[in-house]
Image (tube, rainbow, N blue to C red):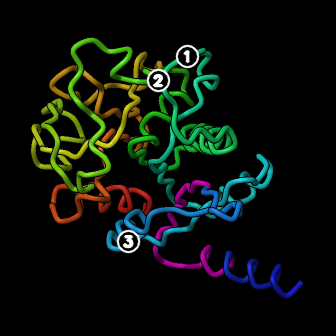
């Protein structure tokens, strides 16, 4: 009972704060001893906090009714990176290599993304989150770029590469909101993914692409802030342009 009261008190305080509360999606990890843990990389939390928001981690395992109960507490939603989206979520059977598939995470994030779209809640999708928004709105993915996209660049710079390694340039529509936020239409970005958008969902508009044509940014027109990027701006906070992405997102959630 004391724990329930404490959680309720915490949520009530969040609802009364002057700073926008940003829901941050999480992921699972199994320890060597077999224990399941819910976590998220600290870079997401500090990026939101430094931009003026209060990050609120959304645990996995909640049913849709419980997620709906949390949703009114949020002023914005950050859909984070991580493992692959299950191809069954977009009706594909594949033999391609898949990594860290978690159907429950897919369910949670797709549900939240759809609610954010319907409710006009500002949302920002990063890497996997960029892909989740596309799937949530009816699009599909390349399950493995190297297998399914001819003449692709290398997009998976992980392991020996630092997460702030600038892997390639992206071309952004100069008239887009994304270009205005970043202050450039040809930023250098990191690249830590092997899946990508194949069929763009109806309603989404492509705003950026890699030199090989892979979609690197989308926007949902008419939405207060519905924007996604394929790269990881939370790992590029040394650059003013990438800090501006989080500031603009949190600013939209403040309105």
* Residue labelled with disc 3: 46
Which quadrant, please, contains the N terminus? bottom right
Foreground tag (1 vs 3): 1
Question: Dot 2 lies on which element?
Answer: loop
Look at the picture and state if 254 lies above or below 105.
below
Q: Are marks 1 and 2 in contact (CB under 8 Å)?
A: yes
Camera-nearest label, 2 or 3: 2
Can you say which quadrant of the picture contains the C terminus? bottom left
Q: Is residue 26 above or below residue 194?
A: below
Q: Is residue 97 left or right of residue 196?
A: right
Q: Earlier in the sequence, mark 2 or mark 3?
A: 3
* Residues at marks 1 and 2, CA–CA distance in whole angstroms: 7 Å
For residue 94, the mark is: 1
Q: Using the image, determine if residue 192 lies above or below residue 59.
A: above
Specify start and end residues of the magenta stretch as a single range.
12-28
Q: Residues within 10 Å of mark 3 (few under 14, many from 20)?
A: some
């Amino acid at each position: 009972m004391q724990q329930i009261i404490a959680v309720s008190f915490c949520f009530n305080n969040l609802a009364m704060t002057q700073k926008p509360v940003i829901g941050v999606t999480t992921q699972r990890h199994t320890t060597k001893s077999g224990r399941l843990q819910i976590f998220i990389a600290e870079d997401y939390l500090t990026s939101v906090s430094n931009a003026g928001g209060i990050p609120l981690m959304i645990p996995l395992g909640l049913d849709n009714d419980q997620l709906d109960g949390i949703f009114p507490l949020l002023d914005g939603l950050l859909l984070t990176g991580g493992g692959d989206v299950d191809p069954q979520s977009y009706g594909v059977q594949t033999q391609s290599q898949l990594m860290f598939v978690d159907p429950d995470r897919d369910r949670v994030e797709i549900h939240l993304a759809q609610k954010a779209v319907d409710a006009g809640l500002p949302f920002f999708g990063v890497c996997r989150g960029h892909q989740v928004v596309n799937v949530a709105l009816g699009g599909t993915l390349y399950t493995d770029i190297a297998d399914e996209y001819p003449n692709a660049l290398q997009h998976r710079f992980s392991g020996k590469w630092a997460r702030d390694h600038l892997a390639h340039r992206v071309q952004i529509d100069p008239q887009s909101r994304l270009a205005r936020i970043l202050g450039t239409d040809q930023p250098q970005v990191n690249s830590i993914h092997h899946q990508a958008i194949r069929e763009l969902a109806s309603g989404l508009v492509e705003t950026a692409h890699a030199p090989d044509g892979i979609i690197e940014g989308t926007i949902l027109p008419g939405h207060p802030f519905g924007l996604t990027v394929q790269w990881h701006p939370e790992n590029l906070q040394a650059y003013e342009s990438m800090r501006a992405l989080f500031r603009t997102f949190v600013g939209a959630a403040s309105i």
